[in-house]
């Protein structure tokens, strides 16, 4: 083999090796997967960015949505300052049963420790415009002891308001301002029956007097109960049903302000917090908008509300209570009637309260009363089911049919004609 032939063969071999090194496109892709280049990362990042953008556009709101909501609604949210003046006799020092402490020479002056006359008290709360007639919704507990009510709008306009009506049993009140010269923006009410746990909410109010504060959160729970402002004949307190629980920050001064959905509709009126330190601890409560829709028109028309009333005290039937009463295992929840108010609708209808005391886990409990398992064909699983139906679905003078279990096994249907809840604010 001459040198020319050998050189030609070597050239062909090197060219073949070079072509093998290029390889097909799929080999390049697999190699790049194990050791990606900068350009490959950019190429792969593009579809990820597109997916992220798609996720963002599917969210129910963004920053601008919240900003727009605040700018639309805050003009309708007001700061409420209340003035509670002591009675004239107390101011003048005419306090009964408080003897004058004499100054004895040589002894410390004890008069400095004598009870001082009551001073004028002031409190702060929130509210929101309900209609163009100047009606403003707030909490009953905000204005309950007020001698003067002062409303401040978002633009700084300040004016006195008059009490139109109040309802301790829903903790709602309506006040009114003179609309002359005012351009009022009302906030629409939403449907609180359609709420879901996890739904995004916004609270606007005046926590600690900081006007126009906005916080966000979610609905943490539904169907809670809070003590109402009036008392039963036996000294217990009535309850407000269907309360909304939220983790949106609510603090003293937020009371009476709106809890809103992302569309800017009022779904509740902020009314209370659960906290050992009188500050936000992650649990706030609001009276639902559908309660507002029922109560406020009555307050505007009559100044008060008549709530239908059964006249029982009771509790949700637990598995331990059912076992203690030897109830059939097929009974799934209900309301154990523990006490009947004398001369109440329940008393007149012949319902029976508990007549036996036992212990469960070392705690004394009442058992033996009727167990309400249905009302007007609807199942009753817990106390809020019964109370919510009576409060929201019935009227004074209406007859409802209770389905009860008596003496562990006997099922009865008992008609009860509802009276107006007695007024006892202590």
Image (tube, helix red, strand yellow):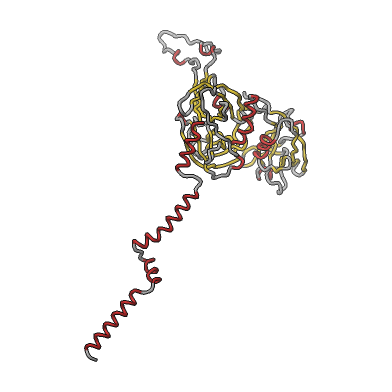
Identify the residue shown where x is 72% and y is 37%: 369
Depth check: 46 or 368 in front?
46
Instruction: State which quadrant residue 105 falls in.
Output: top left
Furthest toward the top, the residue is 105
Q: Is residue 279 left or right of residue 32?
A: right
* Residue 299 seen in this snapshot: yes
Q: Is residue 119 above or below residue 232?
A: above
> Which residue is nearer to you in this view: 163 or 62?
62
Is residue 234 something one can see in this rendering? Answer: no
Q: Nearer the viewer, residue 105 or 182?
A: 182
Which quarter of the figure has residue 410? top right
Q: Residue at x 51, y 10 (%)?
A: 92
Q: Position of residue 423 (x, y in %)?
A: 66, 25
Q: Quadrant of the N terminus?
A: bottom left
**Residue 382 x/y as whole percent:** 66, 41
Q: Quadrant of the C terminus?
A: top right
How many callouts does the rendering have? Answer: 0
Q: Position of residue 340 (x, y in %)?
A: 71, 32
């Amino acid at each position: 083999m001459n040198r020319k032939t050998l050189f030609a063969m070597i050239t062909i071999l090197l060219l073949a090796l070079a072509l093998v090194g290029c390889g097909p496109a799929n080999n390049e892709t697999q190699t790049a997967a194990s050791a990606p280049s900068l350009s490959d990362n950019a190429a792969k990042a593009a579809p990820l960015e597109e997916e992220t953008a798609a996720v963002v556009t599917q969210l129910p709101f963004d920053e601008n949505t919240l900003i727009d909501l605040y700018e639309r609604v805050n003009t309708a949210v007001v700061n409420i300052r209340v003035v509670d003046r002591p009675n004239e006799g107390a101011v003048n020092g005419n306090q009964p049963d408080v003897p004058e402490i004499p100054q004895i020479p040589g002894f410390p002056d004890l008069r400095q420790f004598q009870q001082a006359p009551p001073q004028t008290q002031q409190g702060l709360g929130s509210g929101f415009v309900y209609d163009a007639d100047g009606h403003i919704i707030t909490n009953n507990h905000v204005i309950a002891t007020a001698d003067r009510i002062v409303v401040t709008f978002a633009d700084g306009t300040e004016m006195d308001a008059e009490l139109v009506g109040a309802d301790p049993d829903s903790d709602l009140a309506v006040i009114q301002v003179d609309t002359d010269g005012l351009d009022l923006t009302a906030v629409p009410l939403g449907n609180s029956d359609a709420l879901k746990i996890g739904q995004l909410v916004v609270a606007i109010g005046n926590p600690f007097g900081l006007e126009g504060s906005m916080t966000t959160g979610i609905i943490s729970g539904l169907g809670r109960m809070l003590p109402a402002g009036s008392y039963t004949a036996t000294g217990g307190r009535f309850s407000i049903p269907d309360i909304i629980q939220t983790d949106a920050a609510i603090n003293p001064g937020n009371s009476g302000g709106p809890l809103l959905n992302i569309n800017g509709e009022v779904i509740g009126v902020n009314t209370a917090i659960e906290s050992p330190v009188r500050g936000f601890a992650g649990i706030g409560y609001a009276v639902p908008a559908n309660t507002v829709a029922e109560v406020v028109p009555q307050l505007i028309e009559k100044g008060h509300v008549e709530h239908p009333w059964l006249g029982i005290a009771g509790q949700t039937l637990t598995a331990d209570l059912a076992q203690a009463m030897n109830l059939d295992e097929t009974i799934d929840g209900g309301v154990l009637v523990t006490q009947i108010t004398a001369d109440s609708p329940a008393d007149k209808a012949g319902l029976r309260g508990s007549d036996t005391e036992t212990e469960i886990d070392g705690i004394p409990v009442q058992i033996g009363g009727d167990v309400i398992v249905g009302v007007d064909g609807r199942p009753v699983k817990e106390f809020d089911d019964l109370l919510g139906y009576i409060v929201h679905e019935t009227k004074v003078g209406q007859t409802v049919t209770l389905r009860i279990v008596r003496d562990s096994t006997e099922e009865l249907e008992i008609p009860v004609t509802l009276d107006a809840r007695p007024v006892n604010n202590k």
